[in-house]
Image (spheres, helix red, strand yellow):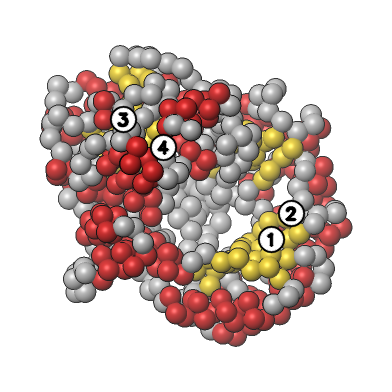
Amino acid sequence: MGVKAEIAAYLRDEIGAIDKEAPESVALVYPSPYRVAMSSLGYQTIYRTINSIDGMAAHRAFLPDDVETWRQSGTPLLTYERMRPVANYGVIAFSVAYETELAGVIHSLELSGIPPLATDRTSRHPIVFAGGPLTFSNPLPLAPFVDAIVMGEADQSIQPVLRMIFDSVSKESALRNLATHPHVFVPALHGDILPPIDKADDARLPAFSQIMTPHTELRNMFLVEPERGCHRGCSYCVMRRSTNDGMRLVKKERVLSLVPDDAKRVGLVGAATTDHPQITEIVHALVDTGREVGLSSLRADRLNDDLMAALRRGGHRTLTTASDGASQRMREVIHRHTSEEQLRQAALLARRHGMKRLKLYLMVGLPGETNDDIDEMVELGNELSSLIPLSLGVAPFVAKRNTPLDGEPFAGINLVDARLRRLRRGVRGRVDVRATSARWAWVEYVLAQGGRAEGLAVLEAVKAGGRFSDWKRAFNALPADRPRRSLVRPTNRLGRATA
């Protein structure tokens, strides 16, 4: 199947796509494949928001599944709505979720025929800016590749940002104008001084799906957020209670009113969905209309028979929650106040309500962790597996900027792998263990703690082929004594420092 035929096939299966032409159009690029992008509630929200502005349109583009095959075809990166080369747009907007998507940004620009480095582009090239979840922690590695970065929640800032760009007489004047926006970072003008992250007005909540498609990680599921943010204080999390005033609730009636009649599957997403005081009522109401319901961020201390019954009626077969720390001691260290007894009760509730499996997420390599902590998880895992089939999803700890654990070292690839072997050996034959690669977690860590130099190293890694050895070589070539960049953030509009 050719490139254009593949795009046409995706479009035929979509419900809710916006077919709009306008004098001022934006190429809205997601630097990961379609199936990932269209599961992003933020990306879909910005798509709808831009298309709601008079005289403006957003046309989507995605990183191909097979970058090299696309490159060899000689076809430029195209927008789905118009089959138009991305390079032909005056404005390109990237939504970047996590650190290693920087490689996708580079590939997307190269496939478009646009120099990846902003310093290599001229006034004849499009203005390239970015936003997305990465801006909540550390967007500095992204700085070499973009002209501007919209910090934080862009629900309301996207319109004035685009207005500044389209109303400017030149690229240079557009960047000068953008530099005056309180939540826009212009690398060429601001150095490494980041503005505070933006907070959308509550009236703009919640985010919800614009397009449903079978070709995503969340097949044909309508997504809506019953809350935004989190009121808890887990010390590893960017979205903890100090970020944008913690958790903001959306009333049950508002959530239910947004679900379209033809949505048979509904996903309730957010950083702390089970902390919503009406979450059980919302799930029951959706299930009563015959819909399947998915729920993110199930907290063990919020589970009870009523909620579990609603989830089971809504099609849940696996209960997913988190331990995060491998032991009670480590959970206390990271302020994740989940007890063994609460995890035990979660397993019992899952079994009582006929679920087939319990899935538990945790991190290894946390500061101060020892083999004793891993052994405690082995003991608990074996106990829980006697109650219900158990899976462990394990991720190496990566310290993020703008959190209390900012600056904590990476435990080391060899140590993390050793801890994973110890865990697997201890639960072998009883618990399914699936772990994120320690090598790629180290790459994420270097970028999460890095700055522009680390971003430029990504370009070298991509040019060399993008294998782990290429990333390692590029990072190791950086000066060992380079100073760690502090994230300089002015106080936010509420008068509190955001760092």
Q: What element carries label 2?
A: strand
The one of 467 and 382 positioned closer to us in this rendering: 467
How far apart marks 3 and 2 lie (CA) works out to: 41 Å
Q: Position of residue 363 (x, y in %)?
A: 55, 68
As measured in the structure, the alpha-carbon distance from the residue carrying label 3 to the one carrying label 4 is: 10 Å
183 left or right of 216?
Answer: left
Q: Residue at x 14, y 21 (%)?
A: 169
Q: Residue at x 79, y 29 (%)?
A: 289
Q: Residue 315, located in which quarter of the rendered image?
A: top right
Q: Earlier in the sequence, mark 1 or mark 3?
A: 3
- Is any part of residue 235 visible from this angle? no
85 vs 243, nearest the viewer: 85
Closer to the chain start, of discs 3 and 4, is: 4
Q: Name the residue under label 4.
A: 62
Q: Distance from label 2 to label 4 (Cα)? A: 31 Å
Give the left or right position of residue 190, taking residue 161 as reference: left
The amino acid sitting under disc 1 is Lys
Crowding around mark 3 (Cα neighbors within 10 Å: few <14, some 14 to 19, many 20+) is: many
User: Pointer 2: what residue?
Assistant: 318
Give the numbered dot on residue 359.
1
Above or below, 484 against 415 in this view is above
Label 1 neighbourhood size at 10 Å, few (<14), some (14-19), many (20+)?
some
Disc 3 marks a residue whose amino acid type is Val
Residue 86 - label: 3
